[in-house]
Image (cartoon, helix red, strand yellow):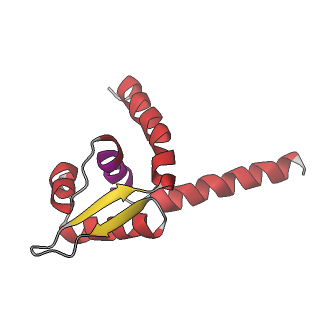
Amino acid sequence: MRKNEQSIQRCVTVSTVQKILGGKWKIEILYYIGMQNIHRFGELRRHVGEITESSLTKQLRELESDGFLHRHDFKELPPRVEYTLTDLGKSFMPVLEVIRQWGEANLK
């Protein structure tokens, strides 16, 4: 493989990651679930802040569809649903920690 072809492949990979995690709230949602141990919809909504219920639902569904989250419906009344990281989501946590550390060091 020529050097130019390798550059194109790396760009495609970064582009794919950006498409998956590029939602306005996705990285923050993953942070709260993976690093703050927050798993319930209402708790997530309070921590994320300005997000609407419909936006949170959409972002959670997309993260589930992309394999980062598992949704567990307890089938109770009142309804209770919890979100946990899949193995793919857990594998992203070291990357998220580096992003957080970089932000603390450089975005003052």
Magenta-drawn stretch contains 26: yes
Front-lying residue, 9 or 47: 47
Residue range highlighted in magenta? 24-33
Q: Where is residue 91 in the image (x, y as percent from the top left)?
A: 51, 46
Seen in the picture, residue 108 relative to 72 is either above or below; the reply is above
Q: Residue 87 in magenta? A: no
Q: Is residue 17 left or right of residue 37?
A: right
Q: Position of residue 40 (x, y in %)?
A: 21, 58
Residue 74, percent from left and from top: 23, 70
Residue lying at the far top in this picture: please name it. Answer: 105
Relative image position of residue 99 (x, y in whole percent): 44, 36
Q: Residue furthest right?
A: 2
Position of the C terminus, as image quadrant, is top left
Please give the name of the residue rendered at 67% of the width and 58% of the height, measured from the top-left corner: 12
Which sits in the foreground, 83 or 6? 83
- Seen as rendered, the residue at the extreme left is 78
Location of residue 65 with respect to 21 vertically, above or below = below
Residue occupying image coordinates x 41% and y 29%? 101
Residue 24 shows in the view: no
Q: Which residue is drawn at 25% across and 54% down?
A: 39
Residue 75 can be seen in this image? yes
The residue under the point 31% across, 50% down is 33
Number of disc labels: 0
Dominant secondary structure of the residues highlighted in magenta in the image: helix
